[in-house]
Image (cartoon, rainbow, N blue to C red):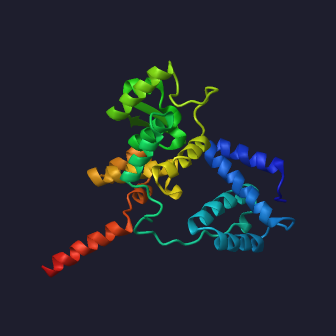
Amino acid sequence: MCEYSPENLLRFQEYLLAEEKSQATIEKYLRDVRYFFTFLKEHTICKEETVAYKKYLSNHYAPSSVNSMLVSLNRFLRFMGEETSCVKLLKIQRQIFASEDRELNRHEYQRLVKAAGNTRLSLVIQTICGTGIRVSELEYITVEAVKAGKATVNCKSKTRVIFIPEMVQKLLKMYIKKSGIKTGSVFISKNGNPLNRKNIWRDMKALCEKANVPPQKVFPHNLRHLFARTFYSIEKDVVRLADLLGHSSINTTRIYTIETGNQNICRLNRVQRCLMT
C-alpha cells in the first residue's frame, strides 16, 4: 500500500539518484510528494483523491506550477505501483510573449551589477549572465577554467563546454588573485564549499531596493533568460543558443527567446504602417 513514511521517501530518493537526477530535482520531487500527503491527511490514495488534489492546486497555483507538482506526484505514484491514481497534466496554450513584469531587462541588470558594487555577488551575477550557465553549474567555474577561458560542465549525464567571455574572465582573474584561491571552484563559502543556490537567491533579493528593480524579476535563473534573449537578438541562431544553454530540445530554447508583449505590438505596428504606405 502506498503511504507516507520516511522509508518510502528514502526509497524514492534512492530511485531518483539511480536515475541520475540532479540534487535540486530530487529535493523538489520530495518536497512536492510531502505536500501531497499533507493535503491527503489520513485518506487513502485513490484516483478521486488525486483528482481532488489537482483541483486544489489549480485553485491556488499557476498552471505551470500545478503541472510541475503533478509531474513529481505521478513519478512517485508510478514508483509505488499506483499508476491508476496518476492524473493528467493541465493543457496550457503556448504563450506567445513573455510577461514584462517578470522578465529582467538590460538596464535593470546593469543597475543590479552597480548596486552589488565590488563584491563577490557582482561577479556571480556577471558570470551567470555572461555565460548563460545555470546557478547549479556555477561550481564548474574553477580557477583552472578561468585560466583556460572555458569550463567543462558535467550535468545530468551530459557534458558541454562553456566559454567565459574576456571581460568576465578578466574580472574573475582579479578576484582569484585578490582572494588567494589556488584551485577549484572560484565561488566558495567560508567553509570551502561551492556557493549554495539559496544563498545566491537571498543575496540577490537583498539588492532589489538598492537597484530599484522589482523583486519578482530578481532571481538567478532570470540572468540565464536575459543571456539567452540577448544572444538571440544579436545572432538569431536558436540552434547555437540551444548548445550554449545545454538544451537537448530546441523547443525548450524557444521559451527563452520569447519576446515581450510590447515588442510584439511594435512589430504589428510596423506591419500596419507597411500596409498603409
Q: Which of 234 and 239 is in front in this view?
A: 234
Picture coordinates of residue 75, whole percent (x, y): 67, 57
Q: Nearer the viewer, residue 132 or 84?
A: 132
Image quarter in which the N terminus is found: bottom right
Residue drawn at (33%, 49%) of the image: 231
Residue 112 placement, left or right of 272: right
Is 73 placed above or below 230 here?
Answer: below
Q: Which of 105 and 32 is in front in this view?
A: 105
Q: Is residue 258 visible?
A: yes
Picture coordinates of residue 157, whole percent (x, y): 53, 40
Image quarter in which the C terminus is found: bottom left
Specify the quadrant of the image occupied by residue 171.
Answer: top left
Residue 255 placement, left or right of 235: right
Is 253 placed above or below 270 here?
Answer: above
Q: Which of 185 and 152 is in front in this view?
A: 185
Residue 181 placement, left or right of 47: left
Residue drawn at (49%, 44%) of the image: 134
Is 87 placed above or below 116 here?
Answer: below
Residue drawn at (52%, 28%) of the image: 185
Picture coordinates of residue 155, whole percent (x, y): 53, 39
Q: Is residue 159 visible?
A: no
Seen as rendered, the residue at the extreme right is 42
Residue drawn at (73%, 67%) of the image: 85
Specify the quadrant of the image occupied by residue 42.
Answer: bottom right
Is 44 placed above or below 149 here?
Answer: below
Picture coordinates of residue 113, whole percent (x, y): 43, 43
